Amino acid sequence: MGILDLRLVRRSVASLTAVAALAVFTGPSWAAEDYNPKMSSGAKRVELQENAFGADPAYEDQEYDIEAQLAIYGGKSEVVAPRPLFELGRKQYVPGQLPEPSEVFGELNPTNFAVQAFGDWRTAVAFNDFGNNELAQIATRLNIDIDMKITSTERLHAFIRPLDSGADFTRCELAGNDRDQGCKLQSDLNLETLFFEGDLANIASGITGDYYKTDRPFTVGFVPLFFQNGLWMDDAIFGGAFSFPALNSPVLDITNMDFTLFYGFNDVNNAAIRDLSGGVADHSVQAYGAHAFIEAREGYLEVGYGILDADRSKIGDQDLHSLGISWSSRYKNIFGYSLRTFISRQKREDGGQDLGNGMAFLLETSWMTSKPYTFIPYANFFLGINRPQPLANAEGLLINTGINFETDGLTGFPFLDDTAADTFGGAIGLQYLFNLDQQLVVEAATVQQYGEQANIAGDQYALGVRWQLPISKAWILRADAMYGVRFNDDDIGGVRFEVRRKF
C-alpha cells in the first residue's frame, strides 16, 4: 500500500470517529416543531417564513467607493486630535497591539504604567475699563495637567500653572493707569492640585484575587471637587472624598444615583469667612459634607449639604452651613431647564458681621428651535435674598447665569456683580454654532438692586458678545466684548482677543 493510500485510510477513520462523537453528544435527531423552549407568557412561537432569508448581497460587479462607505456613517472619518505635550509608557489612543500588562498589583488589577502631560496655553490682548481704572495689556497663561496612570482605576494627578503667581499672570501692560510697569514675568511651580484617586474594590481584587461586585471610588490629596455645575462647590481642598456610585431603586424610580462624602482640612475658599486682615481665611477652615446625584423621573436631582468649621482660636466664630439643591429636566420638546436653590447660614457669636446668611434661587432655560443643536436661545434668571454663599467657590453664584457675569481668568475682563446679594435679574441671549464649526453668543443682562446688603450702588445693565473659531484641532481663536452701565457708579467695558493652543 502506498503513502497516498495510507493517507486516505487515516482520513476515513478520522471522519468515522468524528461522526460517532457527534452522535454521542447530540443524541437522537429531533424536529423543530417538537422543541418547546421556555418562554414568558406574553411570547408565542411563529411559523418559519422561508422567504425571510436570502443570500448576502454581492458587489463583484461594482467598483469600491470609499466616499460611499464614509457616507454610511454620516461622512465621519478619523479625528486627528492634538497629542499630549509629553508621553511616557503606553500612549493614549494609538493603533496597534497593546503591550502585555504587569501584574505587580495582582492578577485582577493589571497595570500599564503611563505618564502624560496635557493642557493648553492661552494668550490674550485686552483693553479693560473698570470704571475707576483702565488697562490695556497682553497676558498669557499656561495650564499643565500631569497624569500618571497606574492601573485602569488608579492614578496620580497634578496640575500646575507655571506662568502665573496666584491671580497675577505674566503680562505686558501697554496702556492705562499702570502702563509704566511694562512687562512682568509671574512664575511659580506651585501645585494647584495633587491627588490620588482609585477604587477600593479593584485594589482589594488585586490583593485577594477575588472579584467584588461593587465599586468604591475614592480620592485623597489636594483634591478638586466640583458639584452642581460648579456653583455650589468648585474648589481644590486638602482632604479627600469617598463615593457610592451606580445605585438604583425601582420602587423610587431611581435609575442611577451617586452618593459622595467629602472632607477638607485646609485651603477651603468661602468669601464669608475672613481672616484678621480682611482676606479669605482659606487656611483656617475645615469643610465636611455630603452630596448626592440622583437620576429619576426623567430628570436629574442634585442635593448637597456641607459645614465650614472655622478655627475660632485664629479667626473667631465664623462657622457656615450650606445647602444646595438643583433639579434639571426638559419640558416636552419646548425647553430644558435647571432650578437651583442655595441656602447658607452663618451665625457669629463673636460680634463680627455675618457675611453668609442668605438664599439664592436660579432658573436656567434653553429653548428648542428647528435647529436644536446649533441655534439655541436661552433665558436665565435669579433672585438673591440677603448674602447667599456657596459652600466653597472662589467665583460668585451667578457665574453661569450668562457671559456678562464671568471674567476670563486671564486679563481680569470686567463683569456684572455675580454675588446675588439682595439683587435680582438675569440674562437673555442666543448661542449659534453654525455648522458646529464656530460659536457666536449675543447676550443682554441686568442686575437689579433691592436690598440694603447688596454689593452694588445701583442697578446694572450689560450687553456682551463672544465669538470662538477652532482653526484646527489644536488652535482656537476667541474674541469678547462687553459694555456695562452701572447706576450710581462708573460704567465698565472691555474688548479682548485670545489665541489658545491645546495639547
Image: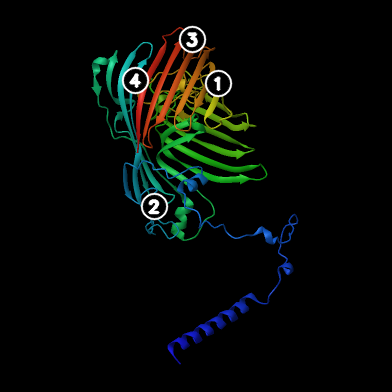
- Secondary structure state at the residue bearing disc 3: loop
Residue occupied by mark 1: 382
Q: CA distance from mark 4 to mark 3?
A: 27 Å
Q: Position of residue 262 (x, y in %)?
A: 48, 38
Q: Nearer the viewer, residue 302 or 84?
A: 84
Q: Nearer the viewer, mark 4 or mark 3?
A: 4
Residue occupied by mark 4: 126
Q: Amino acid at mark 4?
A: Ala
Q: Are dots 2 and 1 in contact, CB under 8 Å?
A: no
Residue at point 71% right, 60% down? Answer: 39
Instruction: Give the mark, 4 or 1, whose residue is nearer the N terminus.
Output: 4
Q: CA distance from mark 2 to mark 3?
A: 60 Å
Q: Determine whether, in the image, residue 167 is placed left or right of residue 298.
A: left
Residue found at the very far front of the displayed protein? 61
**Number of other residues with Cα within 10 Å of mark 1, as a class: few under 14, some 14 to 19, many 20 or more:** many
Q: Nearer the viewer, mark 2 or mark 3?
A: 2
- Secondary structure state at the residue bearing disc 1: strand
Instruction: Give the mark, 2 or 4, whose residue is nearer the N terminus.
Output: 2
Whether residue 408 is visible to the viewer of this picture, yes or no, is no
Residue at point 44% right, 58% down? Answer: 207
Q: CA distance from mark 2 to mark 1?
A: 49 Å
Residue 458 got which mark?
Answer: 3
Q: CA distance from mark 4 to mark 1?
A: 29 Å
Residue 102 got which mark?
Answer: none
Residue 95 got which mark?
Answer: 2
Residue found at the very far bottom of the displayed protein? 1
Q: Determine whether, in the image, residue 422 is placed left or right of residue 249.
A: left
Q: Amino acid at mark 3?
A: Gly
Q: Position of residue 27 (x, y in %)?
A: 66, 77
